[in-house]
Image (cartoon, grey):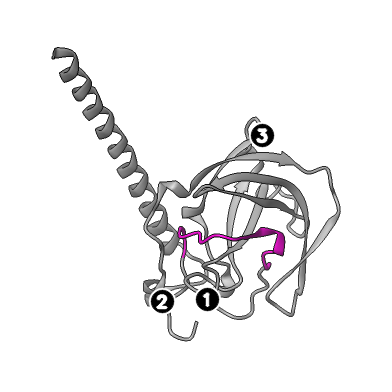
Amino acid sequence: MKKIYSIVILLGISYTGIAQKTADYVSSIMAYQKNYVATHEVVKGKDRSFFRFYTPDENYKINCRFEKSADTTIIPMKTSGTKIPQKDFVRYGKLLFTIHDTTLQLTVFQSKSLPQTDEYKNLLFIPFADVTSGEDTYGTGRYIDITTKDIINNTVVIDFNKAYNPYCAYSNGYNCPIPPAENYLAIAVKAGERSFAKPGH
């Protein structure tokens, strides 16, 4: 009987630990969202009340297998603007992962348009669209940023709870890269930033 009680106690401690970890994660994402809104470079003042986000969900924090690309071909990625109708990228690699028992992949890009300074040289770009695009999220898709240093032993964690909208979601005049067809996910990614709620957007 003592053994059974001990197991019950250990299970209770384990569940409590998991619940606390989940609560800590949710709090960290909510803090991230709050800072994102408060420091946004395009949306100012009262307009910041129109930001919307999905409820943080740790199931969208994904461990991915990374495959480096040997292809250095320049990819002219179309943009939403006319002043700069395309921006140059190369395929840096590929992410392989699973969400809701669905095997998926995303291409990771590296910009050839940005200056190769210390600020940008390690920056990697993951533009994507999914089933929510044009419905509950921005029509052309959303972005995730990582750096080369995030890739360790051919693995990387991407967090869709930090997926964000391009500046074009809030204002005209920007030249935002449009996610290419290869980065369309045939599932609904209900995580990260949703469409901007200000009327007329």
Q: Is residue 111 above or below residue 179?
A: above
Evaluate if marks 2 and 1 touch, with contact meaning CB atoms under 8 Å apart. yes
Q: Earlier in the sequence, mark 2 or mark 1?
A: 2
Which range of residues does the magenta coloring cover? 177-193
Near-viewer residue (87 or 119): 87
Q: Amino acid at mark 1?
A: Tyr
Disc 1 versus disc 3: nearer the observer: 3
Give percent across and percent down for residue 14. Answer: 28, 28
* Disc number placed over residue 54 in the picture, else none: none
Give percent across and percent down for residue 168. Answer: 59, 74
Near-viewer residue (130 or 128): 130
Q: Spot the residue most to the front.
A: 1
* Disc number placed over residue 154 in the picture, else none: 3
Residue where numbered disc 1 is placed: 170
Q: Is residue 121 left or right of residue 16?
A: right
Q: Amino acid at mark 2?
A: Asp
Q: Which residue is located at x 38 percent, y 59 percent?
A: 34
Q: Is residue 18 left or right of residue 134?
A: left
Q: Amino acid at mark 3?
A: Asn
* Disc number placed over residue 47 in the picture, else none: 2
Q: Spot the residue most to the left.
A: 1
Evaluate if marks 1 and 3 touch, with contact meaning CB atoms under 8 Å apart. no
Q: Which residue is located at x 59 percent, y 52 percent?
A: 145
Give percent across and percent down for residue 193. Answer: 47, 63
